[in-house]
Amino acid sequence: MANGMIHSEWSVIEEGFDPSRQKACESIFSLGNGHMGQRANFEEGYSGETLQGSYVAGIYYPDKTRVGWWKNGYPEYFAKVLNSPNWIGIGVEVNGAPLDLAKCPAEGFRRVLDMKEGTLSRSFVAAMPDGKRVRVHAVRFLSMADPEIGVVRYEVAALDAVRLKLTAFIDGDVRNEDANYNEVFWNILETDCGPGRGFLLARTRKLDFRVGFAMKLDCEIDGAPAAVAPACRQTPSLAANVYELELAKGGVVALYKYVAVATSEDHDKDDLKTKAGALAAAAHAAGFAALLEAHRAKWADIWSHSDIVVEGDVEAQQGIRFNIFHLNQTYTGADQRLNIGPKGFTGEKYGGGTYWDTEAFCIPFFVSTAPSRVTRNLLVYRYKHLAKAIENAAKLGFAGGAALYPMVTMNGEECHNEWEITFEEIHRNGAIAFAIYNYIRHTGDEAYLADCGLEVLIGIARFWSQRATFSAERGKFVILGVTGPNEYENNVNNNWYTNTVACWCLDYAREALATVERRWPQRYAEIVAASGLDVAVETACWAQIGAGMYFPYDPRLDLFLQQDGWLDKERIVAADLDPSERPINQHWSWDRILRSPFIKQADVLQGIYLFEEKYDTAVIARHFDYYEARTVHESSLSPCIHAVLAARLGKMEKAYELYLRTSRLDLDDYNHEVEEGLHITSMAGSWLAIVEGFGGKRVRDGKLFLNPLIHPKWRRYAFRILFKDHPVEVAVVKDRVDILYTGPERIVINVYGEDYRLAPGERLTVGRQAPKAEGRRSLAGGRSRSLLGKG
Amino acid sequence: MANGMIHSEWSVIEEGFDPSRQKACESIFSLGNGHMGQRANFEEGYSGETLQGSYVAGIYYPDKTRVGWWKNGYPEYFAKVLNSPNWIGIGVEVNGAPLDLAKCPAEGFRRVLDMKEGTLSRSFVAAMPDGKRVRVHAVRFLSMADPEIGVVRYEVAALDAVRLKLTAFIDGDVRNEDANYNEVFWNILETDCGPGRGFLLARTRKLDFRVGFAMKLDCEIDGAPAAVAPACRQTPSLAANVYELELAKGGVVALYKYVAVATSEDHDKDDLKTKAGALAAAAHAAGFAALLEAHRAKWADIWSHSDIVVEGDVEAQQGIRFNIFHLNQTYTGADQRLNIGPKGFTGEKYGGGTYWDTEAFCIPFFVSTAPSRVTRNLLVYRYKHLAKAIENAAKLGFAGGAALYPMVTMNGEECHNEWEITFEEIHRNGAIAFAIYNYIRHTGDEAYLADCGLEVLIGIARFWSQRATFSAERGKFVILGVTGPNEYENNVNNNWYTNTVACWCLDYAREALATVERRWPQRYAEIVAASGLDVAVETACWAQIGAGMYFPYDPRLDLFLQQDGWLDKERIVAADLDPSERPINQHWSWDRILRSPFIKQADVLQGIYLFEEKYDTAVIARHFDYYEARTVHESSLSPCIHAVLAARLGKMEKAYELYLRTSRLDLDDYNHEVEEGLHITSMAGSWLAIVEGFGGKRVRDGKLFLNPLIHPKWRRYAFRILFKDHPVEVAVVKDRVDILYTGPERIVINVYGEDYRLAPGERLTVGRQAPKAEGRRSLAGGRSRSLLGKG
């Protein structure tokens, strides 16, 4: 990347301060720990262009809907992630003048996101208006070990003798940039201060979420506790401590700010002052070094089962680690009420709500890189929203326990208000069902069906059984009026993908019923009773629809058609497009896009990706060649799926090109929009492109399959995954694949079509093959060091 | 109608004041004169529920668009009709207490809209808080003779001796209820006062429209000029005169308020004070009686060629006159820059913009009831917007002079922002072309093609030729991604109506080219040169598309299908609907409506209505029976078209039922929404239902056709129309049809299939026939008195 960004394997580094890139870098250098997130805003004041962003997971605002034309069924509100009180702030005045990088020239500016350790640091020398200079070094982290704790160490070294004023504060006077009617979302209920401490209690103006922010401060001068008593400064929306110091030339002051962020989601809402105060005090007592050490240890654990190493391609290495890092910052699986917004904790866009991105993209990542409870909690999130999904379907006219999960949600209620998406992009129900299946095949946790999954599957099957209608004309069931994953088509009939996932859901619900009846008969009886399921009648109906569904297909092309009428479109392909008119979504009117044959993201191919085992290579290749040629990849979720399929077909250059489109999307700011936040959910797609694409990882019938390819540019790559919660490491070089399994019991892994039984700790080496060729086995004896180190 | 509304042939009368109906009555009793309009707000203050509405034609505000999700091609603004400064206001205080009917009990309240004369009057006796009583009688009109003048006569009679304060004012402190971001739309530039006069100059905050309001006042006591000098009261937004009077018991004071409303559309914007002042002074000099007389004379002229008499059915009589009255109040044809908003001057809804309603509904009314220049001006309105229509098409990706007229507009620019309508409801282009044809066949004014029409037709033909695309699959041209007149379907392919009007436009454009080439060769050459038309190439393309268009059709049903995939819908009809779920647009989610087979308004039948002569009775009947059964008539524009077709098929009861649905829609407030304003454009449909429906009036090949039916409930009905600017009166009783022609030259009129040649002033009597039966002729000799009197 240009503009001072340095390629580095474990870090993101910016050298030299460029105000025009500040908002972009605020996104890129964001920190998060699942409980909260923080854009890389400066601690000290900054009067330049900035998007202030402090986010607390689970705290949102139901902002009044803004629509052009109301349609029946639209929700009353769109939930917004909240820019919360600013807890990182430390105002700096030098000889009475504010330190502000928009006004004070900075030398040697360097900002580093250390992805291995999860810290953000920044250093520079600022020249003040009076010519005096100070060197600043700031470090912060949001503790992974103690998610309610954020820590800042802010050091100022005097290069000239100066009078210094440091104001450490919590500021409740904050707004969202994205507010439909420009309203303020917070009331500040209380501020309180004492020497070395401060507190602020904020309440959302609707829904009564409360968040308490407590800070404890330490000040060191030249490495020893400072003998200064800070002054308290308190307003109705600010709690601050002010340190006034005289620093001799060469003197160094370090301010430590330990902040606890405690919410009414986790604590009694009337007890937040006490709780936050105790948490901050405990953090303060533990101290910076111990907190950082615990935080690092957590990150080491995360990397131990999710890292990918790429050798010979620093950009690719940095890109994939950046993606894995941010995914883990966004979601840790610790809280069943939380999920993953498309921008995570890095911006306000998309309102922080949950989309099908979670099930279709993030779950395939987490189910292979995190302990199974993490994915299970993502599934439970939807389970807990089942009643709301049933309500949502009822609002649209469905009955009898049919469930339609929302397109965008915080608490299970629909937030989105664009009829062609809200009401019609119903394939999301399929992704939610498929995630249950995907979780179980990866983890073997079939009991999840009995615990939660079956109820969700029944609700979803009921929805499809009502949403499909019988066409007397065709003598088949049809699904009219939908929007498929390709959102460049709206209100189409018989979207092949939607019909395909609908049928799959109807089948899988019946299969799940049978499984639970067989293995957990009592729970089965409970579920049948509670859901009022007329097993014989309803499952017969599901079977009838599943067997009688209409699928658009053209016999001459031997092709599944994206939807009814597809072949009426003009016969042009993406290569025919004038490059100056791309992306078409920035150059063409909406109706031109809709009428064109251009596809935003995988649609038929999304179905082929999901159900790949049903199709032979010729079928996959025919559909890939036809549809990819018409795909403009104008969703961040598009290239990854195509990369996986391209790799499956041995189209290495295509796979690599598409991989590049995803993995550095944000780091290199391809679309000039990273200032709005990072594409968190599509980051999972970069991982898929490597592990499922180049690595050829699949899971079928409870078994792990690998078919690794390697691009000529790469010397070696290696990835760690968890399979049934046990680590598998895979390293690929030009002529060899090494596999190290460290689970507790024997496992069978299929490599290049051949099964290998591995003992715990066993390392397997197989000659590298082109796809579909025969495998050769070579077992390396004994235990081995990790494959993720340099090969 | 319940609630004190009295049925009367020439008036709308409300007896007894019901605050819960005030907003509804404010709409119903609205006045207008083409230049301005005024809801029936009270002159004196009213603290109850009210929608203040003073509207000035042509003055609008480009309110910033409000959308949920922006789509490329959406306009930046939605034009809003402006609630303008209040010029009717006369504050009344009695012994220091304000007269306010929300607080002071009124006896004998009576409000009368005299439709023959175009006046609104109101009288009541109010009891003041101190027990004193006054009788008020207020009359006002917006002069049809002098459209910049509005006049109020406000009389207060003292039933007890009282101290009276009358404050006649112009108030610029006004807002729109419909403002996307709650903004104020006016700046008041100047107020000025003197005894007996006042002035206010308002400027719109965007676009710099300016409106000057000048008032001149006269005060009479007991019939003689009052010897009181009013005090001036002036604020930055108010210009007022205050009259303080002592009235003895039985004393009567009458305040005359002559107001001129002059705009920068008609006058130099820097000269509005002088102009408005002079206009008000002239009105004042002419006096109330003379102004009223000139106003009445204009209305007498309007009724002389547009009245419909219904005997034996007072409700029907009042209903149709109410419709004719409001249509004429809204549009007089005096100004080519003006058009007809769906609510006219009676409310803010739909922003006062121009829709296809004008061409599809209002032009068929005006072309038969007003001098041809009126309709011609409506056509010229679109001609003047041609460049904007070409720009609009260019924004959507069309080129080479293709024109897409906007869905909603004030100045030719698109205002609407709902992609499925804005970009897709393109059949509006067809209505605009058809209106040219319709005008010419009624008036014989073929020269309009050379003057203006041909250029519009070329732009429209170019649009269709690009919008239609070739389907290699079908070997036919298709039109993908449209919304037909039935807005309960969106983004469908090959809407039969749209494809039908598109082909008609392509044919008619070629025909018009040939006509102009033959009759006005020089003008033809100019138009071809100016539009850059490659005659040979482009017309060949138009012919090819017109001949090669695909039309959805089912051979088994022998039915034109509304769109591709129509027969996949569930096979249910409107009679199957649970009455408690109607109207479905208030009970069903939008997606349920879209997926259902229920039709909002005529769609295939709109095409059969337009091109009726192409189809024999069996075809019309088959399509009527099929589609009307699925039509829920949830547009005010729906029942009328069906009434005409039902009458065409001899389905008298159906036609009558559908006629009733339109004609008293607002008077009886069927949908409980009349408070928002009247359905002005659909009022033209009521006229169509009688004249084209029951009267069977058609124009083909320059000849007038009549096939009158009469409903058993009606003793007699008669209508006046203009044909080629000459009056034709038609009176129908059970057994006879009388026709009186008063044009200057002989005419041939076809009645019940037989041609009759009528001399000027000749009266023809024909025996009444069932449709399609043979006609009998009986010529009554000599001239006759008008048939519109009682028969």
Image (spheres, coloured by chain):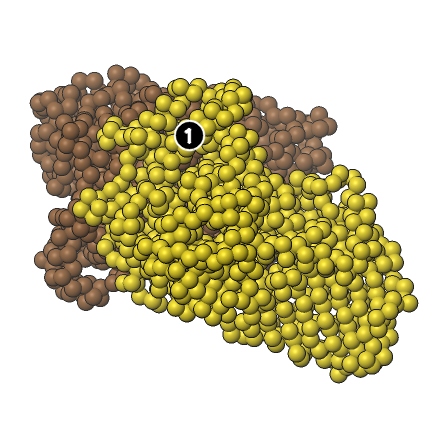
Chain colours: A brown, B yellow
Residue A766 higher or lower than B105, as above or below: above
- Residue drawn at x 60%, y 54% is B302
Label 1 SS: helix
Q: Which chain carries label 1?
A: B
In the picture, residue B111 is in which quadrant? bottom right
- Give the residue at x 42% y 57%: B778
Q: Where is residue B722 in the image (x, y as percent from the top left)?
A: 53, 49
Query: Residue A435's x, y, as percent?
Result: 24, 46
- Judging by the rendered image, the residue that carries numbered circle 1 is B511
B34 relative position to B656: left or right: right
Please tell me which residue lies in front, B356 or B169: B356
Which is nearer the eye, A222 or A718?
A718
Look at 78% across and 81% down and name the residue there.
Answer: B159
Q: In this view, does B92 lie above or below A205?
A: below
Question: In this orientation, which residue lies closer to the viewer: A712 or B362?
Answer: B362
**Residue A712 visible (yes or no):** yes
Q: Looking at the picture, how far across and down is residue B553, in whole percent?
A: 24, 42
Q: Quick check: B243 left or right of A414?
A: right
